[in-house]
Amino acid sequence: MDSTNVLAPSQFSVPEAATMTKNPTLICAPVMADSVDVMLADVSKAKSSGADLVEIRLDSLKTFQPSSHLPALINNRPLPLLFTYRPNWEGGMYQGDDNSRFEALRLAMDLGADYIDIELKVANQFYDFIRGKTYDKTKVIVSSHNYQQTPSVEDLSDLVARIQATGADIVKIATTALEITDVARMFQIMVHSQCYHSSQGGSSYML
């Protein structure tokens, strides 16, 4: 991966194949469903509703077969896709081992996924897992989630630096806003950042 810059707008852009106008702020629609068929229908709905990209929550699938399900999702996609396979220790539903999860995300990259999300806690292990291959079509988002509070500006700045140090293409921070001043702190961090907003109550997202 190339060395990380702090979320310059040129680095987080919608692929030309999507034929959309570049925007300083992108709207990401999260999709969680029991089956790939429902996910595909929801991706189409997201496009018609004006979303710029869609987050596919692989951990929400009742049965997940990467070798068949990932091509079905990626081939002929109407919007750029972000693949997330969130473990239960980071608020997701996946309860298996990390190697199986890494394999699925690596396959998504092999198939040309636009973005994949990996948690800060295991980011270094994931980069070791994919070492030796070049993925020019996929941007890696390294994410951190705080479901209790929004840290101080100083702690948020330190968190951004820690995520950058992993070699992430894009930084994502999700915090829980308990009061309006929490949102203000996130805006301070986002001043020089490219952002997307995800409609999940009580959370501030930064990319």
Image (cartoon, helix red, strand yellow):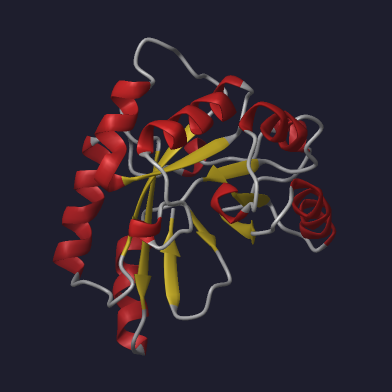
Q: Residue at x 40, y 35 (%)?
A: 169
Picture coordinates of residue 192 (x, y %)? 36, 54
Image quadrant assignment for residue 203 = bottom left
Q: Residue at x 54, y 51 (%)?
A: 59
Image quadrant assignment for residue 205 = bottom left
Describe residue 68's horizontal placement relative to residue 101 as left or right: right
Q: Quadrant of the N terminus?
A: top left
Residue closest to the eye, 112 or 9: 112
Describe residue 50's horizontal placement relative to residue 128 as left or right: right
Image quadrant assignment for residue 206 = bottom left
Judge whether residue 132 can be spotted in this image. Answer: yes
190 relative to 65, above or below: below
Judge whether residue 191 can be spotted in this image. Answer: no
Q: Residue at x 25, y 51 (%)?
A: 160
Picture coordinates of residue 194 (x, y %)? 46, 52
81 relative to 205, above or below: above
204 relative to 8, above or below: below
Picture coordinates of residue 16 (x, y %)? 71, 31
Q: Residue at x 77, y 29 (%)?
A: 75
Picture coordinates of residue 100 (x, y %)? 45, 33
